[in-house]
Image (cartoon, rainbow, N blue to C red):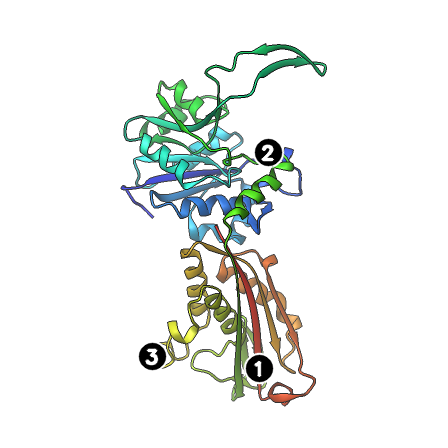
Amino acid sequence: MTDTGRAAAVIVAAGRGVRAGGDRPKQWQTVAGRTVLEHTLARFEAHPGVGQIVVVVAAEDHDRAAMLGLPDRCTVAPGASTRAGSVLSGLAVIEDATRVLIHDAARCCVSPEVIDRVIAALDTHQGAAPALPVTDALWTGADGKVTGTTDRAGLWRAQTPQGFHLGPILAAHGAFDGDAPDDVAVARAAGIDVAIVAGDEDNLKITTAADFARAARILETDLDIRTGTGYDVHRFGPGDHVMLCGVKVPHGRGLQGHSDADVGMHALTDAIYGALAEGDIGRHFPPSDQQWKGAESHIFLAHAAGLAAARGFAISNADITLVCEHPKVGPHAGSMRAELARICGIEVGRVSVKATTSERLGFTGREEGIAAMAAVTLVSS
């Protein structure tokens, strides 16, 4: 996870964001098919100039971070009671970088160009941050009435990521007492010069409920949404259990196959490959290769999910239908959903597992085997 040739990134996601409304902090709410934090993280994951990524989360949100698979994608650091304290916590776990970008999780529409400009400015400055000049007239007011005007000359609307050389900003945060609105304030208190680079109107910070709609419009402008389907069948043979969606289900017979014959997981894996136009399991794990004989199917699913992530896609939702007379799937569906979600690195609420019979018709009705169908939706970052 270390890379001295690239900047580290600290994404601050420990705030409560109460002005945005909702039943959870804004960074954990969904916009354009994914959580705000997932969109933000994906922007930095996809940038070639960014190496280690640290996401700072509040202690009460660690379960949410785990459900999204964040510990497998980045370094997770504990949040503090203030923003400055949370940033210091994130800076402290950077492993091997000389530059750092500090970004608000709520700015999920940050563009590669803005990140480029901040990184480039660090070649000649100790610090750099994007901003937009104030162009509207500025008023003072009281009791709903205008009381005066203020000169807008030299005023800027600050944005993130704010970039710094790691040593100086780490020392600045370590010496800073109290809280600050952003890291530029901390840097200037320590005498660090900060260059202004061009910001972006689309780099909004979600603050109120209305901002979610605007962020969705921006994110969906270049959104790539793909669907894929998968289908698999395995016949019954000797055995005392079947593997279904990663769960060992007791049964009088087992399923036969080159691997562990997990028909549900195979169907989902093929659905992901299909959405990516990457063929099927046989293309990536040929049955002629004996190293895959008896392999556990989570290997295949993890590969497909990893391939999707590497291509810049997140799994928005997955739906699996198992077709069989027996065993009964209902008692195990919850465990199946949890296991599939864990392997794919997504929330359980994005995974559906259900079952149906074929009314005693066909090979499933005669209990000769089990079939599975799967559908998946991938959403680009």
Residue furthest to the top in view is: 148
Query: What distance separates the C-alpha of mark 2 from that of mark 1?
Result: 49 Å
- The residue that label 1 is drawn on is 370
Amino acid marked by disc 3: Asp
Amino acid marked by disc 1: Ile
Q: Residue 150: percent from the left, percent from the top?
A: 56, 11
Earlier sequence position, callout 1 versus callout 3: 3
Q: As displayed, is residue 210 above or below residue 223?
A: above
Query: What distance separates the C-alpha of mark 2 from that of mark 3?
Result: 53 Å
- The residue that label 3 is drawn on is 289
Q: Residue 186: percent from the left, percent from the top?
A: 43, 23
Which mark identifies residue 207?
Answer: 2
**Neighbour class for label 2 at 10 Å: few (<14), some, many (≥20)?**
some
Amino acid marked by disc 2: Thr
Q: Secondary structure at mark 2?
A: loop
Comparing labels 2 and 3, the label whose residue is closer to the camera: 2
